[in-house]
Image (cartoon, helix red, strand yellow):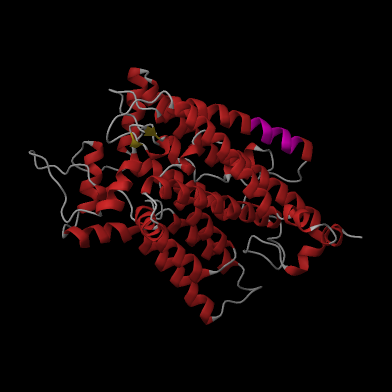
């Protein structure tokens, strides 16, 4: 009797547990409980500072601190009709720096349920993170199992065809183990508590994973529509242009085996166009909402204290300051970004990580270059590294081939414990606000 037939004779709850998505959800929620305990313990040491800590002096919730205060302002009051400026004529910090999908959905749910933002927003973030974990498990399982199927009929798809699934059941089971291990490591990483903050991290991860899964499955129109939603969530849509081009190249390479019809060709071009448009969507809406063409770029300069944004210059400054002052405020972010960049470059070598789908490796490279080009080298960089989830496959030792369960779960347990210890440090160092320090998580 095959394993699949045996599973069908199990009780319903056991059959559900055998589903990868259910196990991924349980692992993710269990780790969010751990993070919640750490946040609640740390909140006892947080003093009340209006505009930074929230939601109330008698009920300090770290999930409502820092940028969550901006999202609540957007949910309550919307966006200003013009960019506020100071006496020197420079733009001041304002809500246009923050994308609308998360705060507006929290407003709509709050209006429908009568619940306040401080209740609705963290709950929506938690649920979005749960969805992201489930999609991540399915994406990694399918692509890991199909990574060596490129020479067969599934070339360019990154997944196994129906004909290949029969003799590859062991590979599929190993793929699910690897995916579950990677989800656990990602969900336990030092900045994972941000996934239950009133922040956009969970929303952006959910939409990013939906986009990548649709792209791998060659659901071109669906991927394009998801890209548009992602363009209203966080400024991470531009790197996806490189990813969709890589996906189109793979599909074009497989055209002799699977010819491209007119409808599919139009869908492929549509996905590329929608993905490209998503990267400029919020900048265009800010222009429309304020009547100022440079409304969004001007707003972003307010956070940096500069007159214009120069690509790569912030990171060069961060490295220079880290070298000069030896202050962890600059040293640790610079080291984190450099380590991530080197890690990504290593995974691009086919022999090092052949089991990571090429589109996921391209995503890691494009996103890392994007961070180096446009993001400041500040303490928020740790949180910005969350989308580099495919690197978890390397950490659990499954990037090259067949896995040994004992080694896989031993490495997973190690990195989960390291991640939880890192959460304690991250929360205590950055999430807790102790003036005059103003370095955000």
Quadrant where the C terminus is found in the figure = top left
Residue 1, x across and y down, in percent: 92, 60
Q: Is residue 355 visible?
A: no
Residue 163 horizontal/vertical position (percent): 77, 69
Write the residue at 57% across / 30% down.
420
Residue at image point 48% right, 32% down: 39
The residue range painted magenta reads: 407-415
Q: Pick whichever, 267 or 261, lies toward us.
A: 267
- Residue 159: horizontal and vertical position, in percent? 67, 61
Question: Looking at the image, how many numbered discs can be counted on the residues?
Answer: 0
- Residue positioned most to the left: 87
Whether residue 89 is situated above or below residue 124 in the rendered picture:
above
Instruction: Identify which residue, 260 or 371, lies in the foreground.
Output: 371
- Figure quadrant of residue 261: bottom right
User: Relative to the observer, which residue lies in front, 260 or 15?
Assistant: 15
Q: Is residue 50 visible?
A: yes
Q: Is residue 10 one of those drawn in magenta?
A: no
Position of residue 43 in the picture relative to residue 10 (left or right) = left
Q: Is residue 147 toward the left or the right of residue 262 in the image?
A: right
Q: Quadrant of residue 351?
A: top right
Q: Residue furthest right?
A: 1
Seen in the picture, residue 350 relative to 219 is either above or below; the reply is above
Measuring 8% from the left and 38% from the top, which residue is drawn there? Answer: 88
- Locate residue 211 relative to residue 439 in the image: left or right: right
Q: Is residue 325 left or right of residue 259?
A: left
Pick the residue in front: 392 or 81: 81
- Residue 67 position within the rendered picture, expressed as x and y whole percent measured from the top left: 34, 41
Q: Main secondary structure of the magenta part?
A: helix
């Amino acid at each position: 009797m095959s394993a699949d037939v045996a599973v069908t004779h199990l009780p319903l709850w056991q059959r559900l547990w055998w589903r990868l998505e259910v196990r991924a959800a349980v692992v993710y929620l269990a780790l969010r409980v751990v993070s919640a305990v750490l946040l609640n313990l740390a909140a006892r040491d947080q003093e009340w500072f209006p505009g930074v800590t929230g939601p109330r002096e008698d009920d300090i919730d770290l999930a409502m601190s820092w940028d969550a205060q901006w999202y609540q302002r957007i949910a309550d009051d919307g966006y200003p009709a013009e960019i506020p400026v100071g006496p020197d004529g420079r733009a001041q910090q304002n809500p246009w720096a923050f994308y609308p999908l998360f705060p507006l959905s929290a407003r709509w749910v709050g209006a429908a349920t009568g619940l306040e933002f401080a209740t609705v927003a963290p709950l929506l973030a938690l649920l979005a993170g749960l969805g992201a974990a489930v999609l991540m498990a399915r994406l990694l399982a399918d692509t890991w199992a199909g990574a060596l199927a490129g020479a067969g009929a599934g070339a360019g798809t990154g997944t196994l065809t129906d004909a290949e699934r029969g003799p590859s059941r062991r590979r599929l089971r190993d793929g699910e183990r690897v995916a579950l291990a990677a989800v656990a490591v990602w969900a336990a990483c030092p900045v994972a508590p941000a996934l239950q903050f009133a922040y956009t991290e969970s929303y952006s991860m959910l939409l990013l994973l939906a986009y990548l899964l649709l792209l791998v499955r060659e659901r071109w129109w669906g991927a394009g529509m998801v890209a548009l939603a992602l363009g209203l969530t966080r400024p991470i849509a531009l790197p996806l242009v490189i990813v969709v081009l890589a996906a189109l190249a793979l599909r074009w390479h497989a055209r002799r085996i699977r010819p491209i019809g007119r409808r599919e060709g139009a869908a492929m071009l549509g996905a590329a166009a929608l993905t490209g448009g998503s990267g400029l969507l919020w900048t265009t809406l800010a222009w429309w909402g304020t009547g100022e063409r440079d409304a969004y770029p001007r707003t972003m300069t307010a956070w940096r204290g500069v007159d214009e944004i120069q690509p790569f210059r912030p990171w060069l400054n961060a490295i220079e300051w880290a070298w000069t002052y030896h202050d962890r405020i600059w040293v640790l972010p610079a080291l984190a970004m450099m380590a991530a960049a080197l890690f990504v470059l290593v995974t691009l070598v086919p022999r090092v990580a052949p089991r990571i789908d090429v589109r996921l490796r391209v995503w890691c490279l494009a996103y890392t270059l994007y961070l180096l080009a446009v993001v400041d080298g500040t303490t928020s960089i740790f949180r910005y590294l969350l989308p580099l989830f495919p690197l978890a496959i390397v950490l659990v030792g499954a990037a090259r081939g067949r896995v040994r369960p004992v080694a896989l779960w031993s490495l997973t347990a190690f990195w989960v414990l390291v991640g939880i210890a890192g959460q304690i440090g991250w929360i205590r160092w950055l999430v807790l606000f102790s003036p005059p320090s103003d370095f955000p998580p």
